[in-house]
Image (tube, grey):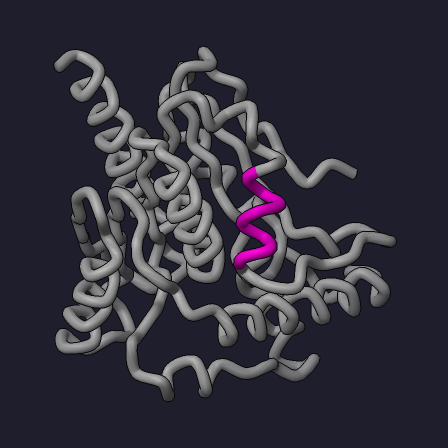
Amino acid sequence: QDNLIEFRRGAGQRNVVCIHPAGGTAFCYLSLAKELPESIGVYGVQSPGLNPGESTEPSVEAMADAYLRRIAALTSQPLVLTGLSFGGLVAYEMARRLTAAGHRQVTVVLLDTQGSDDPGFRQQIGTVDMAEFRDKLVRFNGMYPGIEDAQVERYFHLYNHNRLAMAAYECAPQAGRIVLIQAREGFTRPQLHELRSFWRRRAGNGYKARLVHGGHWDMLESAEVHRVSQTLRQELQRFDTQEAQ
């Protein structure tokens, strides 16, 4: 099966590509895709290893390379890359590679993607057990306890594989423009500030941060998705302004 989902083809001049979070599926972006204008192409990249017989990519860097090959036809146009949590890390690495290759019209929008220069931060990212994973499936992925066991087993291994890839990723500078959207709930003010500083240091061509209400998943599953789509629309409009100058 194809790991690139076309939510909407759009007019072919402006595109948003949404990278899967650690769970591997990209359908969490469906409500976001519906919020964006009809003229915008919206795509989702799903994780290799989600479907039977597929092998996973070994690292965030390898995922970035593979996904850039997959969306090669879209990279000649102004592009917004976005991702929730782990998906934001892969989107960042993709943007970093595009920027290094000379692309100037690429923005990465990070949806509550965590990071820290503290060495202990990555060391504490570990795997989860099956009980915790089943709980996450039911709560966040719209899946229910009746799901086939073989599928759960595959998703479980993929989720932990992606968590380990997150722990191994060093997040070197520097991408072009970075926009960070942070969930307010569950973080202290110093923690929110520290994360903003972390990503600001990795932006090579402009940086912006904004807060949304609620927790991590609320930004895609509540009224807050409108705020997220508004930010994406603003970034797409920036490309229009650049071309007019």
Residue 111, placed above or below residue 135: above
Q: Based on the displayed image, in which of its 4 quarters is residue 131 positioned?
A: bottom right
Quarter of the image for the N terminus: give it: top right
Residue 223, placed above or below residue 136: above
Picture residue at 20% right of the left edge, 61% below the top: 201
- Asked whether residue 46 is drawn in magenta, I would say no
Picture residue at 30% right of the left edge, 31% below the top: 104
Whether residue 134 sits left or right of residue 233 in the image: it is right
Whether residue 87 sits left or right of residue 161 in the image: it is left
Quarter of the image for the C terminus: give it: top left
Q: Position of residue 189 (x, y in %)?
A: 14, 74
- Asked whether residue 62 is drawn in magenta, I would say yes
Picture residue at 31% right of the left edge, 39% below the top: 107
Q: Based on the displayed image, in which of its 4 quarters is residue 121 positioned?
A: bottom left
Whether residue 31 sits left or right of residue 174 in the image: it is right
Q: Which residues are magenta?
A: 61-68
Q: Nearer the viewer, residue 85 or 73?
A: 73
